[in-house]
Image (cartoon, helix red, strand yellow):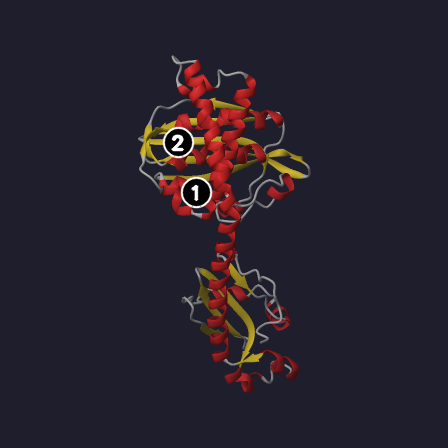
Amino acid sequence: MNISPFPIRVQVGAEFQSQSGLIFDSTKYCIDNCNGFNCRKEYEDLVFVKNKPHFKECHKGFLICSFVIHQRQYVIHGMIDARSKDKNKRIFDKKYIGTNTIGREKISKFIETYTALDKTYFKNMLKKTNELIFPYHDIKRLVGTIVSNIEIYAKRTNPTMNLDTAVYSLDEKLKSIFVTSKLIDSYTSVVDALSSPESLKSGTSRMRRVYNAFHKMAQILESKAISKKLNIKFNGSDFTEIPAYTSLDLLPFIILDNAIKYSSEINDIIIYFKKDGSDLIVQVENTGCIITDEDKGMIFKRLNRGKFSSSFSSEGSGIGLYLAKVIAEHHNAVIEVESAPLSYQHRGIEIAVNIFTIRFKI
């Protein structure tokens, strides 16, 4: 069924473009008569109904269909309504009318079929993902055993020290094994969270210090930072406790690992702890590729990366910041980013001071 001969997005204004979905571009008739961009007038009063098409005809005689499938908005433009093709004979040539004329009932059938296919696709994708992730559980158990045994040995060796100090007082080989194991554990936890987001809020919460979580993760990621000639520094400290799930440990891991990945070399990553009234504010500052205004919201959505992220680092997958946002929400916090451009480039990409701010409502 030839619904539209143009499979590219149409620019219809930032507000509409920010919504996820598929928009088919306007035809040559639209471009010649409206310069392509006047379409935004036609989109202002579109109605989106779940799994049900809404039709309207633009001032040039084209049929526009808008609908929603699984929380994604879609627009199909450029069709000629079979019920009004006679009216448009003077506007369109016979070939175009023959190719693009379609009945509304066929569009409704297409949406019904597409909805079923879309649902099946995501169901199969989730099944395949879980099959691929299953072996990670054994790795996670093994790594957990290594970490536990090292912690027990450290505590027996230095019984008067607290656990963290005792572990980091071990000889370099054991400490290296511990740090590597904790990193593997963190990465597999991200994979677990991706396959089962509800696990981020599983178990019973207990009172924990956010500062301790960031400090411990900074120690674990220190060697990765040093390999890029980066230093992780703290500015301020805080002893506020919040009710937290075990997933809280993933939040500093994701934010700090992200800062290391996207930092230009020989710069400091600074972690600020501040209080604003009763709120606890944690800020992670790094110098790296600029985050555009358009990207500031998109990078917290699943499978989205910043415009320059791929050119700056091949490590990212568009998952980390999405999970960070979910974890923050589970801990009564919000996360946002600011990006202030500097006057130079690195690898042809504009460099900026990026600050990720997490505000915990206490």
* Quarter of the rendering containing residue 177: top right
In this rendering, does residue 18 appear at all?
no
Which residue was labeled with disc 2? 281
Q: Which mark is residue 165?
A: none
Given this view, does label 2 or label 1 mark the residue nearer the observer? 1
C-alpha separation, residue under disc 2 versus residue under disc 1: 15 Å
Mark 2 Cα within 10 Å, few/some/many (few <14, many 20+)? some
All told, the count of numbered labels is 2
Residue 288, horizontal then vertical, whole percent: 59, 34
Q: Earlier in the sequence, mark 2 or mark 1?
A: 2
The quadrant the C terminus occupies is top left
Residue 212 lies, with reference to residue 189, above or below; the image says above
Query: Is 74 drawn above or below residue 229 in the view shown?
Result: below
Residue lying at 45% horizontally and 64% vertically, measured from the top left:
69
Outermost residue, right side: 348
- Height in image: 105 above or below 310? below
Q: Which residue is mark 1?
A: 325
Q: Residue furthest bottom?
A: 86
Please report contact status of discs 2 and 1: CB closer than 8 Å, yes or no: no
Foreground pick, 317 / 128? 128
* Residue 267 falls in image quadrant: top right
Q: Position of residue 174 (x, y in %)?
A: 53, 21
Q: Secondary structure at mark 2?
A: strand
Q: Position of residue 191 (x, y in %)?
A: 49, 43
Amino acid at circle 1: Lys
